[in-house]
């Protein structure tokens, strides 16, 4: 006797945790935001298989494309704990465009990748709005991106971000540090805070060891711990592009993971060393709080964090004061923080000295 087939509910992608209709609604919500970043070279809209950018090669003799990709690290955890997602996109853009500008290149376009367990419409729109704000600050277009809904891979409320930027520079104007020489000056541009590096240590010290709340204020700080940690990374693109028009910049250093000790040697010649003058700039209170609560050695602080300097410029001594004046006129807090000296065989590439 034949048995009747058991009827069961049809399976759908939505049942598996991926809501295509919600994803399409998200794309429609962010289209007008993304349009705000469009440069004249953009010839495609959002929703195609790829973004189209028509670069006029006649504008340059020997154009060189410069690319960078990065994320935001565990700063994302702070955004998720505070349920504040409208500025983390600025950080995402900043990490890549600041890496592109240090080589003398103008950022042209940016792509983002957002991965999450479930697309929460309003939260996702806030994230992209931050990316848009970052692109506007950098003068580049948000050319496209990918939003991946991955149920079972991310915990509820968790998400990850990655970004990719492409810029362009005339080959003979590439900034690679090759012309850095003895007696050059080091100019430091102030950071807005931790930027997007060192958050694993910061969270361990402040939230675990110090048992501080993100809503708590600490003596000497005008903001709460959470507000300080979520302060967006400063984007230096427009100020530096302005400087490039009038001055010869020998080297630029984006102070990210690795701090002073690991980033400065990436640009200075092997025969040189960078001597940083401690006390030549104001270190924001958040760094002192982390150092004191965590009993973190000074060397470790300068290896992990930017310590209040987000970008360094290495310039000829004769141009240093004029460059400082121009930066300050554009609203940058800039300081003369060091010099380039000859390095002996037994000396480190980076050292510190008192005033």
Image (cartoon, grey):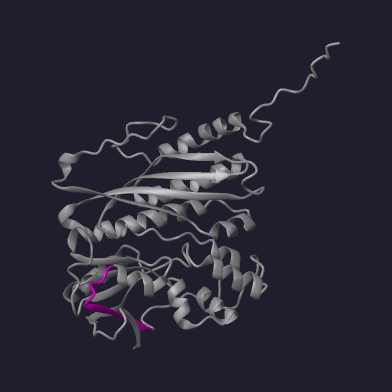
Rendered location of residue 314, percent (x, y): 25, 71
Image quadrant assignment for residue 119: top right
Please say if 16 is above or below 106: above
Q: Magenta stretch: give its range.
A: 267-278
274 with respect to 124 (left or right):
left
- Give the percent coordinates (x, y) of residue 117: 62, 43
Q: In the picture shown, does residue 277 fall above or below 238?
A: below
Q: Is residue 45 visible?
A: yes
Q: Residue at x 17, y 43 (%)?
A: 59
Q: Which residue is most to the front?
A: 1
Point out residue 30 in the picture as x, y percentages from the top left corner: 50, 37
Which residue shows up at 62% across the image and 46% down it?
153
Q: Quadrant of the C terminus?
A: bottom left
Considering every residue shown, the one lying at the far left of the view is 61
Residue 190 forms part of the magenta stretch: no
Q: Is residue 115 left or right of residue 178?
A: right
Residue 271 belongs to magenta span: yes
Q: Is residue 72 left or right of residue 182?
A: right
Q: Residue at x 51, y 62 (%)?
A: 231
- Where residue 73 appears, as percent x and y from the top left, is 51, 59
Give residue 74's quadrant in the image.
bottom right
User: Which residue occupies 38% across, 75% down?
Assistant: 261
């Amino acid at each position: 006797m034949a048995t009747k087939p058991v009827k069961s509910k049809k399976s759908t992608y939505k049942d598996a945790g991926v809501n295509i209709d919600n994803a399409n609604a998200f794309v429609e919500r962010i289209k007008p935001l993304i349009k705000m970043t469009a440069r004249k070279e953009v010839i495609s809209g959002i929703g195609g298989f790829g973004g189209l950018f028509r670069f006029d090669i006649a504008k340059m003799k020997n154009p060189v494309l410069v690319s960078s990709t990065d994320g935001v690290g565990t700063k994302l955890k702070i955004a998720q704990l505070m349920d504040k997602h409208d500025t983390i996109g600025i950080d995402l853009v900043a990490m890549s465009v600041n890496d592109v500008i240090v080589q003398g290149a103008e950022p042209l376009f940016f792509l983002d990748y957002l991965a999450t367990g479930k697309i929460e419409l309003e939260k996702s729109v806030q994230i992209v709005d931050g990316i848009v704000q970052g692109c506007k600050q950098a003068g580049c277009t948000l050319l496209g991106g990918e939003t991946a809904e991955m149920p079972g891979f991310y915990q509820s409320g968790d998400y990850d971000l990655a970004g990719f930027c492409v810029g362009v520079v005339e080959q003979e104007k590439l900034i690679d540090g090759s012309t850095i020489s003895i007696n050059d000056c080091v100019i430091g541009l102030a950071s807005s805070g931790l930027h997007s590096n060192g958050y694993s240590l910061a969270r361990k010290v402040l939230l675990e060891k110090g048992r501080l709340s993100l809503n708590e204020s600490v003596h000497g700080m005008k903001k709460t711990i959470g507000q300080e940690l979520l302060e967006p990374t400063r984007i230096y693109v427009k100020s530096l592009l302005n400087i490039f028009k009038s001055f010869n910049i020998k080297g630029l250093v984006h102070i990210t993971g690795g701090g002073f000790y690991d980033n400065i040697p990436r640009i200075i010649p092997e025969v040189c060393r960078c001597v940083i003058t401690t006390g030549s700039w104001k270190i924001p209170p958040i760094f002192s709080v982390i150092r004191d609560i965590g009993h973190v050695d000074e060397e470790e602080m300068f290896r992990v964090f930017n310590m209040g300097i987000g970008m360094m410029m290495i310039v000829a001594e004769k141009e240093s004061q004029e460059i400082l004046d121009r930066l300050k006129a554009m609203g940058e807090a800039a300081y003369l923080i060091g010099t380039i000296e000859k390095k002996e065989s037994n000396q480190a590439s980076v050292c510190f000295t008192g005033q």
